[in-house]
Image (spheres, helix red, strand yellow):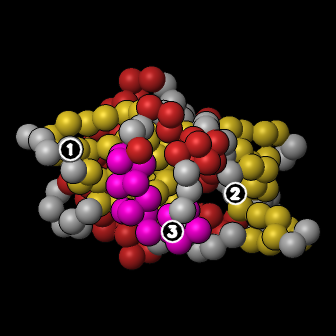
Amino acid sequence: MYEYVVAKPSELSLSQMKMVLNLWQIEEWQQLTKGEFDDVFYNNEFHLLVDDNGQMLSVSRINFNFQISVSDSIHTIAELVGFVSRKPRHGHGSLLFRHILTSLTERGVEAIGFCEPVSRVFYEKCGVEIFYSQSRFIKEKINGEWVYNSNEDIVNLTLSERTKAIIKGLTTVAPAYLISG
């Protein structure tokens, strides 16, 4: 049996926080205190799939700080990040992903995700729309200069038709600029 949990950072217990950080394996975050964790992820929510023993099977977070500027118009779009399963290929990620999609849809939250080409198969199997290599048209400020992002795909989780058209319309001539992420 599994439990699907949605929680703000402050609602996670210390042990849950440690499980999340352990699954993410991002070295600079491993030593965060609970207070620092809550501050870093203040405008995020965590989506967890937990087994009967309280063990985290899969985790992701929704970042509500993601903003891009396109043609002098700012768009805030929720961003799926940190999506990982403790045991890949056991179905936990797919189950959590379906729960996340349902939650976002029911609340009317527009959201995207980013994925490397090696992860395309997962999202294709989940039946979500992928804008292949479209993130290359999002510029990010690095060392004071606007540079193009990676060649990751953009995953359409719950975009409106209007926002979807904006994302699909990005080009080198009409890029987006990452304002905050």
Gap in angstroms between the C-alphas marked 1 and 3? 22 Å
Q: Position of residue 147 (x, y in %)?
A: 80, 72
The residue that disc 3 covers is 26
Q: Closer to the camera: disc 2 or disc 1?
A: 1
Residue at 44% across / 74% down in the picture?
A: 117
In the rendered image, residue 19 lying in the magenta stretch gets the answer: yes
Amino acid type assigned to the residue bearing label 1 in the image: Gly
| Magenta-colored segment: predominant secondary structure | helix
In the rendering, which numbered label is found on residue 24? none
Residue at 64% across / 42% down in the picture?
A: 39
Gap in angstroms between the C-alphas marked 2 and 1? 43 Å
The residue that disc 2 covers is 170
Determine contact: label 2, label 3, CB under 8 Å: no
Q: Is residue 107 above or below residue 60?
A: above
Q: Secondary structure at mark 3?
A: loop
The residue that disc 1 covers is 54
Amino acid type assigned to the residue bearing label 2 in the image: Leu
